[in-house]
Amino acid sequence: MLTVIIVAVVAFILLISIFYYNRFVVLSNRIDNSLSQINVQLKRRTDLIPNLIETVKGYAKHEKSIMKDVNDARKALVSAKDVVGKVKANNVLEGALGRLFAIAENYPDLKANTNFIELQRELSSTEDRVAYARQNYNDSILTYNNMVQKVPGTVFAGMYGRKVKEYLQIAEVEKKNVKVSF
């Protein structure tokens, strides 16, 4: 009878260990997938930018410095290797794109150009997708971190070498209130 109880306890512990190991694998894969979705949306945006620059060039020939800034920021984002680098490059690109769209205010014909309007709409849609992908990534990190930090997950996390992961952070510049004046 004692042997049956010991075997049952060992089997139960083994099943729980397998469950937690598999749960950590699923959550880690979800995080990797979420990060991949962010990269897909950032790539989509960087693919749209050359078309936007070409459209604007025809109207704003003397605004070459902003075109160069956008192009350089795009190249930096494409060549960034890690999450931190991509976030920093993305912030620079967003600033450059903001300046590019501000230029359009000075060119009524450009603002009315169908290609420009469509590209602007595509970029806006992509920005929404990037925001959603970032939220999904952070939600995945939250679920994973909860598993790592809660009992009994913390015991198994230690056994499997799993550690708390970092969230994607918003840059301090993006946290400041936007100044609107008329």
Image (cartoon, helix red, strand yellow):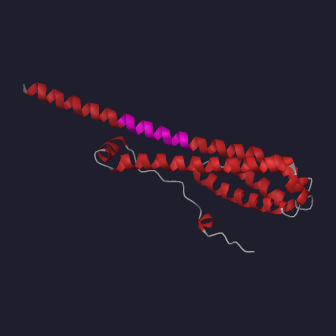
Query: What's the residue at 44%, 36% (across, down)?
Result: 26
Q: Is residue 24 magenta?
A: yes
Rendering coords of residue 34 (x, y %) = 54, 42
The answer to whether 8 appears left or right of 91 in the picture is left
- Res 162 quadrant in image: top left
Rendering coords of residue 19 (x, y %) = 33, 34
Query: What's the residue at 41%, 49% (across, down)?
Result: 145
Q: How many numbered marks, from 0 up?
A: 0
Question: As displayed, is residue 11 above or below residue 86?
Answer: above
- Res 64 quadrant in image: bottom right
| Quadrant in the picture for the C terminus | bottom right
First to last magenta residue range: 21-34
The answer to whether 17 appears left or right of 128 in the picture is left
Foreground: 79 or 15? 15
Query: What's the residue at 61%, 69% (across, down)?
Result: 176
Rendering coords of residue 42 (x, y %) = 67, 46
